[in-house]
Amino acid sequence: MTRQGDATAPPASSAPLDPIKLDVTAKVSYGIGSIAVGIKDAGFKSMLLIYYNQVVGLPASKVAFAIMIALVIEAVLDPVIGYISDNWRSRLGRRHPFMYVSAIPSALTFLLLWFPPSGWEQDHLLLYLIVSAVILRSFIALYEIPSVSLVSELTTDYDARTSLMSYRYYFFFTGGLILSLLTFRVFLQPDAEYPVGQLNPNGYHKYALVASAVMFVSILIAAVGTHKYIPRLRRPPARRKLTLLRSLKEMFETLSHRSFLMITIAGLCKSATIGISGALNLFLFTYYWELDSTEIALLQLDSLFSAILAATLTRPLSRRFGKKYVCMVFYVGAFLIGATPLLLRHFGLFWENGSVNLVPTLFVQGIVFSFTGMSSTILAQSMIADVVEDVERKTGRRNEGVLFSAGSLISKAISGIGVFGAGLILTYVNFPEKAKPGEVSPAMLDQLAMTYLPVAAGLYCIGLFCLWQYKITRESHEANLAALGADPGAQASPTAANS
């Protein structure tokens, strides 16, 4: 008889039922749910800093501080949500109750974030931003962590997990992208009062209304679309007495897994860098490259092509060369390609602002940069999924929720640590508030770019070293499945395996 904590086998109550055969509708529905997370991340990464800094009028450092506070609180809360969902008992299973409950409050709190009270003093506005951001990110976490945890339950196959993650991240990236495109092309348009569309507050309000509605619908689609699989998912472990001390000990035991720590640190470094560049991008587009809202909208399309490439190529490449090595190549590529235009402009080797070649060149560069970044993120999440069985073999517990709570912190670093870092860089170069394009000195803009690049290079080097330390391979994963009594291909249906 297996007891909780026995390192030789998992608890019998957590064993899966018959292998799950996922149809395309279920995969697409599951992926659509990540649109809500993508919208939230895109909003925090690209627009929240410039909105509260240049439109509302808060100093960049204070906006970055508020977003960082929200991330720190969320980082503490996420493993708790994951642990609770791992052990949750209900007729709707372990994950779906949280997914359903999160839909309405996530949409409402996102809406409130973009409607700060008018006439408030800076300190009061800062408090409003902090509270709104914390509440929003907490409710989104109620959906995101149980949802992403389903990947390890729906299939144990090494390659099928990458495929399912590709669905998830395709919609994650394209959902936020399409809404951003709509925002810059339709909402953030210049008028008589606001000649620079990116500084038009009315556009942000329209964006918030549409975004909150899409978030609500996407979460419901994911929950309903995977609802029929609830009876076939992993059951919670046998009832046992859980004290606070024991719960903390189990979470620490799970999160201290070496390969998991390495892939998490690598992902945090990359995501923080992408977060910094994402938060600075709208500043760079507006002031460094001096683009209008229509040109910025066009550049948003590059990620649409990137998402298609990532969803199509990531799985076959990782199947041929292994997740770790493909991830490392994409990891390095993302930095080198992202840095190229800024370095060329610094040395006077790039197109001048206003050149007919500027936007097309940035567009092509953006496709390759986003493709490498998206693919490395897909692979990092798939690698975390493979940690689940390694932890189960060593501890006797399946803690998908706890593992993916920290894994989700990787994407949240984009809009937390990244925006905080961007705010510090803007403060360091003394970037002016409510500035107008063409009035910021070229020397300050060059300093902005050249301050960002060394920071990014350092983070990528740390991440690459950690990524090298990840030890789980296809062979060790299949050995774990065999030791746990599972057929390595049992839960990869023909549909899943060939997608």
Image (cartoon, rainbow, N blue to C red):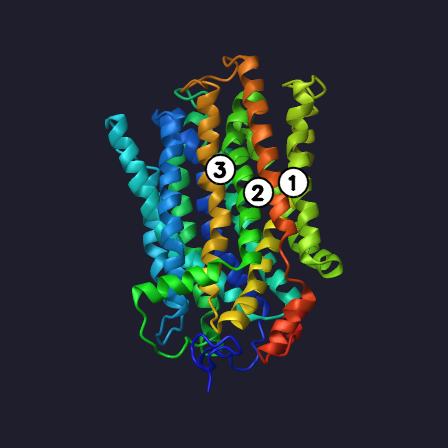
Crowding at mark 3 (Cα within 10 Å: few <14, some 14-19, many 20+): many
Q: Residue at x 34, y 61 (%)?
A: 101
x, y percentage for residue 195? 45, 20
Disc assigned to residue 418: 3
Disc assigned to residue 316: none
Q: Earlier in the sequence, mark 3 or mark 1?
A: 1
Q: Residue at x 35, y 42 (%)?
A: 133
Q: What residue type is disc 1 on?
A: Ala
Q: Secondary structure at mark 2?
A: helix
Quadrant location of residue 465?
A: top right
Q: Nearer the viewer, residue 424 or 49?
A: 424
Vertical arrangement, residue 180 with respect to residue 233, above or below = above
Q: Nearer the viewer, residue 151 or 198?
A: 151
Crowding at mark 1 (Cα within 10 Å: few <14, some 14-19, many 20+): many
Report which residue position mark 1 lands on. Answer: 334
* Residue 148 seen by the camera: yes
Q: What residue type is disc 3 on?
A: Gly
Q: What residue type is disc 2 on?
A: Lys
x, y percentage for residue 416? 44, 40
Cα separation between marks 1 and 2 = 9 Å
Q: Are marks 1 and 2 in contact (CB under 8 Å)?
A: yes
Q: Earlier in the sequence, mark 1 or mark 2?
A: 2
Quadrant location of residue 191?
A: top left
Q: Residue at x 43, y 51 (%)?
A: 214
Report which residue position mark 2 lands on. Answer: 270
